[in-house]
Amino acid sequence: MQSQSQSAHTKLDTPPGNQMGVSKLPGYLTEGFYDEVVDADGIARPEAIALVDLINRLPRGELIRRQDAIERSLYQMGITFTVYSDEQGTEKIMPFDIVPRILSAEVWTDVELGLKQRIRALNRFLSDVYNDRNIINAGLIPASIVDSCPQYLPQCMGLRPPQDVWCHITGTDLVRDNQGDVYVLEDNLRCPSGVSYVLQNRSMMKKNFPVAFTDSSVRPVSDYPARLYQMLRKMAPADMLNPTVVVLTPGVYNSAYYEHSFLAHQMGVELVEGRDLIVQDDRVYMRTTDGLQPVDVIYRRVDDIFLDPEVFRKDSVLGVPGLMRAYRAGNVALANAPGTGVADDKVVYAFVPEMIRFYLGEEPILNNVPTYLCQRDDDRKYVLEHLDELVVKAAGESGGYGILIGPHATDEERQEFAVKIKENPRNYVAQPTLQLSRVPTMVGDELEGRHVDLRPYILCASADDMDDVYVLPGGLTRVALKKGSLVVNSSQGGGSKDTWVVARPGQDVATP
């Protein structure tokens, strides 16, 4: 038993921790949280032994020197994001932490199966809710829940995307609790961002830790752009042999513009804005120096309501007039399909387990976090009486905004949220405050535990064939850099880590 006065971090000039064949992080305390690198006694979990041994072998100051070098490289490459509310300047580098998160092959198997199951159900729900509405007619989801969702678009009624796939690219946020169990925190089905950080973080880590990387048998992520491109090509109308694919961006002032340009470059396709495209005779064309060129597939990173001023917001200058006409005519494919936002509404999220049972006849492999819907009288009463215990979220917000973390909030903040809940109960859900898992993280020249979540990315080319669904092994691990914080979003001071998924025998292993 370590004394209560011992520091809850480990200095990087401590002696090696591999004594009697046991790999440890000397002095590092888990403080009662589930740590994904070491157990409660500070002993490395089997998948993390090579990493812990490396940390112990490095000379004092080497880890922080490598982290500083990586962050300089990321900045020089222009790997930034935009914080619109920051008056000090909008361009920010995504803070990077050099200690990777490591997931065992066993844990990842369940995650992968669970995500494939979930995306199948969500695709069927979207097709259903914009067409026959069977799940509503069966009484499993109230019509008022769907129809009151701001992201439910009546303009999409009757849509049938190719192969009934609505969500081609999905980012699902996962967390682990104090027992290490995995839960789905939310689904991101419109324009999920962050995969560019996954690829660039991995590139930097392979260069800086080649031995530990190889010894840990890490699965590769570098083929994601190629897989994305092949999936987009499969979406093309009429089985074209050489379809033209483009990435549609809102422009350089968008917070994820770096990612848009990065993915377009990696796939070898054109990055376009709405003004670069034109619709003639229900076909989409790209303006080029050689004249108009047909466009067959659009990976759109423009929000639904800005896509087509003829159908959605008439004042939009980001979209393409007539795009929805071409889409309904089957002359262009869009990823993701318009209207998918209804399925990542935080109220609709609570019904995903019922979707899985209704559409697939299966029990969910990955559980939701238990969720109270403030629209329900009993749930609202409980939430208002337990605001000091719960996390309250606005249904349509993202990026860490519109959240009350009850145990860490002031009485005034809780009272403000109580008023908001009473005024608009449909807009709020509440969940128990989970003790999120932690991973050792650089704080100055020391390692301290910090809370993390995970956003894997799923590519879906078919709503029914699971061989056509790919789950990137790993994803974006976001870390709450502030001590004790549970908010991992980069816009709220969070950072990112590389995510290492250990390969099973026979699976591909990344090479430095």
Image (cartoon, rainbow, N blue to C red):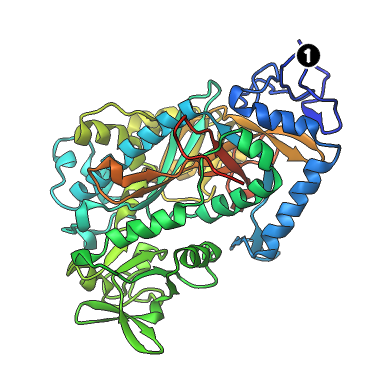
Q: Quadrant of residue 351?
A: top left
Image coords of residue 282 (percent x, y): 20, 77
Residue at the outermost top position? 1
Say left or right for 407 vs 240.
right
Q: Residue at position x 55%, y 71% from top?
A: 253
Question: SS class of the residue under badge 1?
Answer: loop
At 22% from the left and 72% from the top, the residue drawn is 326
Left or right relative to 271: residue 91? right
| Residue on which disc 1 sits | 2
Quick check: 488 above or below 505? below
- Counting the numbered discs, the total is 1
**Residue 152 appears in view:** yes
Q: Residue furthest bottom?
A: 290
The residue nearer to you, when weighing 330 against 293, is 293
Q: Residues within 10 Å of mark 1 (few under 14, many from 20)?
A: few
Position of the N terminus, as image quadrant, is top right
| Residue displayed at 37% across by 47% down | 344
Q: Nearer the viewer, residue 405 or 58?
A: 58
Q: Is residue 197 above or below residue 273?
A: above
Name the outermost residue toward the front. Answer: 506
Q: Locate residue 393, reporting x and y percent.
A: 47, 42
Q: Is residue 100 visible?
A: no
In the rendered image, the vertical position of residue 372 relative to residue 144, given as above or below: above
| Residue 112 image point, x, y percent | 40, 35
Counting from the top left corner in percent of width and height, residue 126 is at 25, 49
Mark 1 residue type: Gln
Quick one: 485 or 429, which is closer to the camera?
485
